[in-house]
Amino acid sequence: MTQYTKPLPTPDDFDKPYWTALKKHELRMQKCVDCGEIWFPPTPVCPACLSHNHEWIKLSGKGKIWSWVFFHQLYFPSFSDEIPYNVVAVKLDEGPLMTSNMVECKNEDIRCDMRVEVFFDDVTDLVTLPKFRPDGSAKPGS
Amino acid sequence: MKLRDIRDKTAIAGVGNTPFGALYKKRDPRRNAYTLGLEAFENALEDSGLHKEDIDGVIMSRIPSYSKMCVMAGIKNPRLTNVLEAEGRMSGIALQYAAMAVYTGMANVVACIYGNDGWSAGATYGSEPQMIDSYNSPFGMTSPGASLALMWQRHMHEYGTTAEDLGVLAISQRKFASMNLNAVMRTPLTMDQYMKSRYICYPLRIYDYCLINDGGVCLIVTSAERAKDCKKRPVYIMATGQAANHTPYYHAPDYGWNAMKLVADQVYTMAGVGPGEIDCAQIYDNFLPTVMLSLEGYGFCPKGESGRWIRGGRIELGGELPVNTSGGHCSESYMQGWALHAEAVRQLRGECGDRQVKDCEIVQYICSSPICSSHILRR
């Protein structure tokens, strides 16, 4: 396997559960036990009520594409083989907006409001990135 | 506390800048934010007729050390000193803070100084190591331009705006730049050239992106009373306001309109005028969709209508609302809002030659970003 050279996340003390869950192929985010707010990216306290009391709930992994772009300009040399590559902003059914890439879908088939589901991409032995594919792509039993 | 009416109590008494087009011809590693800021400061002082000793407040941006800058400018004991972050949204904020300081008497004459050596220093916006973060970089996402591309893509989906709409704006700004001897890009642009230009981040093309060039700008702010004794006709600050839009990303699902509305309500109320009374607008164009979203967010046209609204010469010289009359960031100079302020002042003074807006009495500056800001200025 060739070495993975793209930028990797740098987990810190309070977002480690997010990355650990992804490794187990689960999309988990923080939910406030006191007010019910679900937020992302991870932060130490609930941004709605400042409660320190939150749990890492498992999300459906479903949502829709709020918007999308194709990068033609090379900013990260490690992406040179993929130009133009897509970047999507996915609005999860539970509320948060996240940045990702569409997989198992041609760039020209990406549309706003398209239903998508999470795809766990094990990019290295240690890191799994949450990517998305058209909803319903999962084969039974996979 | 009630918002106090500072309308017409403060004024811009001097503006200065470096050459832009001439500096763009050749990179020079000896150029830096200090030398550029200093040159702009000297020019602004000369423009105002004030002396260095009159300056008792200094607010800078993109200049690494306030101390070093003040040492170079010989400003020894200012009563107010600060340096704001290097982001373009700080230009409007610098002017606002200066007006607040002058209005409260915390300083009498404030020099707002900016220097940008991005061209000579080889700045590569979006590729800097400090931009790497866990939630965007692993997917190849970077640069505010890509966030504007996301917003424009969504805007086209929701409202039916088009790539050609941005082309109309790009061509209009270039036309203004062709009438500006100091502009970096002065060759007129056609729709065909625009549409055939390369994508940076689809759906945005290279002409939708600001330039990268060297330069400096300085604005000198003082009380309306004192400005009357300065060399040039005062430009009064009728209103100023800001509202932030702090979200996890540079792109905002509401296009930033909630924050823009807060600012619009404040400045139009404070100035006692509305969008229809603005003679010319200087609208922050880091990327051209920002201008479109601002025109809609401030009520110059209905939401989703900017593409149709800007057509037919409406934003050109002689039109209802000339926009970015210097050529803006995409054609004149990327001075992160600072040169747009200088242009606003010069339009109000009637100093703009071929691109002068006739009977220009009220100009609005608008910057839409994670901190939205606006001023309404009058002669």
Image: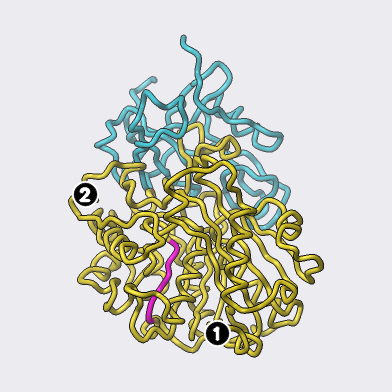
Chain colours: A cyan, B yellow
Q: Are marks 1 and 2 on the same chain?
A: yes
Question: Does residue B319 appear in the picture of this structure?
Answer: yes
- The kind of secondary structure element at disc 1 is loop
> Is the Cβ of the residue at disc 1 closer than 8 Å to that at disc 2?
no
How far separated are the C-alphas under marks 1 and 2? 41 Å
Residue position for label 2: B193
Instruction: Check if residue B282 falls in the magenta segment.
Output: yes
How packed mark 2 is, by other alpha carbons closer than 10 Å (few <14, some 14-19, many 20 or more), is: few
Tell me the amino acid under the disc marked 1: Pro
Q: Residue at x 29, y 43 (%)?
A: A111
Parent chain of label 2: B
Q: Taking B68 as reference, is B123 above or below it?
A: above
Residue position for label 1: B234
Parent chain of label 1: B
Q: Residue at x 32, y 51 (%)?
A: B207
Q: Nearer the viewer, residue B375 or A104?
A: B375
Q: Nearer the viewer, residue B42 or B282?
A: B42
Q: What residue range appears in magenta?
A: B279-284
Residue B187: percent from the left, percent from the top? 28, 55
Tell me the amino acid under the disc marked 2: Gln
How packed mark 1 is, by other alpha carbons closer than 10 Å (few <14, some 14-19, many 20 or more), is: many
Q: Residue B186's mark?
A: none
Q: Nearer the viewer, residue B196 or A127?
A: B196
Instruction: Check if residue B135 falls in the magenta segment.
Output: no
- Tell whether B291 sits left or right of B313: right
Q: Taking B359 as reference, is B334 above or below it?
A: above
Of badges 1 and 2, nearer the viewer stands 1
Residue B24: percent from the left, percent from the top? 44, 49
- Tell whether A105 sits left or right of B103: left
Q: Earlier in the sequence, mark 1 or mark 2?
A: 2
Q: Taking A61 as reference, is B213 above or below it?
A: below
- The kind of secondary structure element at disc 2 is helix
